[in-house]
Image (cartoon, coloured by chain):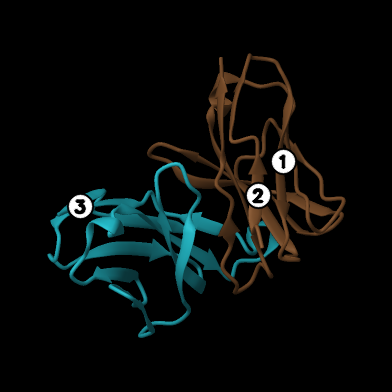
Amino acid sequence: EDQVTQSPEALRLQEGESSSLNCSYTVSGLRGLFWYRQDPGKGPEFLFTLYSAGEEKEKERLKATLTKKESFLHITAPKPEDSATYLCAVRSIGGGTSYGKLTFGQGTILTVHP
Amino acid sequence: NAGVTQTPKFQVLKTGQSMTLQCAQDMNHEYMSWYRQDPGMGLRLIHYSVGAGITDQGEVPNGYNVSRSTTEDFPLRLLSAAPSQTSVYFCASSRDRANQPQHFGDGTRLSIL
C-alpha cells in the first residue's frame, strides 16, 4: 500500500527566512510525485510533478527535488503570500483499481510572518 | 476556461437525506475523480472514472454512487446521508490517469446533522 508522510505538520517562518518541507513516500513503483498548494476554502492547486530521482523543478521562490525515498519543497526568501497548506501526493505504477490513484500526505501548514 | 466547477459550495443535510454533488470540467479531460478531505486524514479517493460510461471505486466508496454519462460531468450521489459523511468533497480531472497532474475544483463543504 502506498504511503506518504509529510513533515513538519506546521511551519512558521519570518519573511525572508528560507526553509524546506519534507515528503517521505513508500510506493511499489513511482509513476509520479506531485506537489500542490491549498489555500483556505479552496481546492489544491497544482505546483510540480517529479518523475525520477534527481529531478528538480522550480517556480518563483519554490524548488522541488526528488530522491528514491523523499521529496523536498525548498522555499527561498518566502513572503506572506506563500502562506498555505502544501500537499504532496504520489501515483504508483500499481495496476487494477489502484491504477492512476493519487495517495496524499496530510500536508504542511506554512505561515510566513511579515 | 472555468476548469473544474463544483456545486453547491455549501450544504447542510439531515441524516437519511439524499443529494447529488455536481462536478463539471471544460478541459475535455478523460479522467475524473472524487475525494473527501477530513482533518488529519488527508485527501482520500472515493470514486473515479476513466471516461464516459466507465467508473470504479476508490478507497472509501461506501455510501456513495457515481455515474459518467458525458465527458464533462461526474456527479457524486449520497444515497442516505450519515454524520460520518460530513466532510469537504473535491472533484478533480486530468488528461489521463498515468502521468498528468489532476486539477481540482474548489470543493463542496457538506455537513450532516
Look at the image and give the colour of chain A.
Answer: cyan
For the point 55% across and 23% down, the residue is B111
Which percent across, then down, holds residue B53? 87, 54
Q: Secondary structure at mark 1?
A: strand
Q: Which residue is mark 2?
A: B5
Q: Secondary structure at mark 2?
A: strand
* Residue A23, quarter of picture: bottom left
Residues packed near mark 1 inside 10 Å, few (<14), some (14 to 19) or many (20 plus): some
Look at the image and give the colour of chain B.
Answer: brown
State left or right for residue B80 relative to residue A14.
right
- Callouts 2 and 3 on one subunit: no
Marker count (numbered): 3
Q: Which residue is mark 3?
A: A11
Examine the rendered structure and indicate whether residue A55 appears above or below residue B32.
below
**Mark 2 belongs to which amino acid?**
Thr
Q: CA distance from mark 2 to mark 3?
A: 31 Å
For the point 56% across and 14% down, the residue is B113
Q: CA distance from mark 3 to mark 1?
A: 35 Å
Nearer mark to the viewer, of 3 and 1: 1
Q: Which residue is mark 1?
A: B22
Which percent across, then down, holds residue B33? 66, 52
Instruction: Give the chain letter at badge 1.
Output: B
Examine the rendered structure and indicate whether residue B44 appears above or below residue B85.
below
Instruction: Give the chain letter at badge 3.
Output: A
